[in-house]
Amino acid sequence: MTSFAAMLLLTAVLQTPVNPADVEARLWVARQALRLGRVDEAEGGFRSVLREHPEDVDARIGLGMVLTRTGDWQGALEVLRPAEQTAGENADLFSALARAYRSGGDDQRALEYFSRARTLAPDDPDVALGYEAVARSYGHWIAVEGFEQSGAADDVGSGSITVDVRVMPRLHLEAMGRAQKGSGYSDAAGGAGGVWHAGRATTVACRAIGGSGNVALPASDVAGDVVHYAALVEIGASIRRLTFTDADVVAASPVIAWIPNDFWRLDARYTYSRSAFDATGSSKGDNSVMLRETWQGWRRAAVQATYAYGIESFEDLTADRINSLGATTLAAGLRIDVPSLARITATWEHQWRSKDTRIDRFAVSIVQAIP
């Protein structure tokens, strides 16, 4: 049965009258309503059971999940925490508590409760994925990335490594290095940065990287950004300054992401950049736009499609692009999450540059989280 057919069947079942005396049936109907996204019906169903049976653990778990989904994580905790006293070792309760704590920005407690739930229900895929998501954001991690580029004047190979260490519950420090090799040059750069979780839904980051004698990579690259998470959207801004041998680039970007459900995510970024050239004393402004759609079609795999005009990634900006920032890029990627807490992403890009120059780039990144 397809997921669409299953939804039609559940919708028909929800319209069938239920015996008011059958508590299990009423709870089942409320769970299916929540599954279909009909949160008002689900909340009403769980609350009706709790009015008659205030200590019903399953009703408390269900109501806590509804409140977490609607953004009332404080109300969810008020409902769920009393149940912990009487429910004993209950994986569903621990999972619901973990999601409420994570919604409230307390990743440390969320990880603790997900760990307890995973011990009791090691084969539950929702518990496993919830644990992995928190471990990736809260834990330490190591990222390795590399790409090969062909089709331009010469082939280019590049690789980078980043090590992120959680030094405090809300503070991560990073160390990073990058190397790139092309025709007649071999560049290297290194640096450090930090990520601070300034509040329940706000993250502030700053990074600086550079290297002396570079031909393609910047001599210095200093960036800062802030992101705020608000229900179905993420909004933020970034500013960046890159210094090359003969030019400086300053770029400012507003960013937004729309996340309507667990399956779709749309990221958008606009960038205004201004380049100053030492040799001529001139400067010019440029505009860049990036749109990326992500579809989480499977529990552990997602497909990405990207369109960009201008600079597709300022992290990869090199000296040869300064005089020709206008380009059109199409990209497709596959992201896979594995139970070992590794995330593997493979991306292919095709880019049309000025003077009828075209390039192809294939990139692979591996991010290993360590709780």
Image (cartoon, helix red, strand yellow):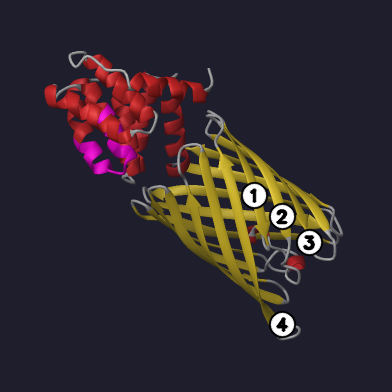
Dividing the picture into quadrants, the one containing residue 99 is: top left
The quarter in which the C terminus is drawn is: top left
Amino acid at pointer 4: Asp
Give the spatial CA distance, label 2 vs label 1.
8 Å
Residue underneath mark 2: 329
Q: Amino acid at mark 3?
A: Arg
**Mark 1 / mark 4, whichever is N-terminal:** 4
Residue 364 seen in render: no
Q: CA distance from mark 2 to mark 4?
A: 29 Å
Residue 130, image x and y in percent? 42, 32
Q: Which residue is mark 3?
A: 353
* Element under disc 1: strand
For residue 306, the mark is: 1
Distance between the Cα atoms at labels 3 and 1? Answer: 16 Å
Q: Are marks 2 and 1 in contact (CB under 8 Å)?
A: yes
In three-dimensional space, the C-alpha distance between marks 3 and 4, rounded to whole angstroms, equals 24 Å
Which residue is at the front of the view, 315 or 144? 315
Magenta segment includes 63: yes
In this rendering, position of residue 321 left or right of residue 204: right
Tag 4 or tag 2, which sits nearer the N-term?
Answer: 4
Disc 1 residue crowd, few under 14, some 14–19, many 20+, Cα 10 Å: many
Residue identifier under label 4:
278
User: Closer to the camera: disc 3 or disc 4?
Assistant: 3
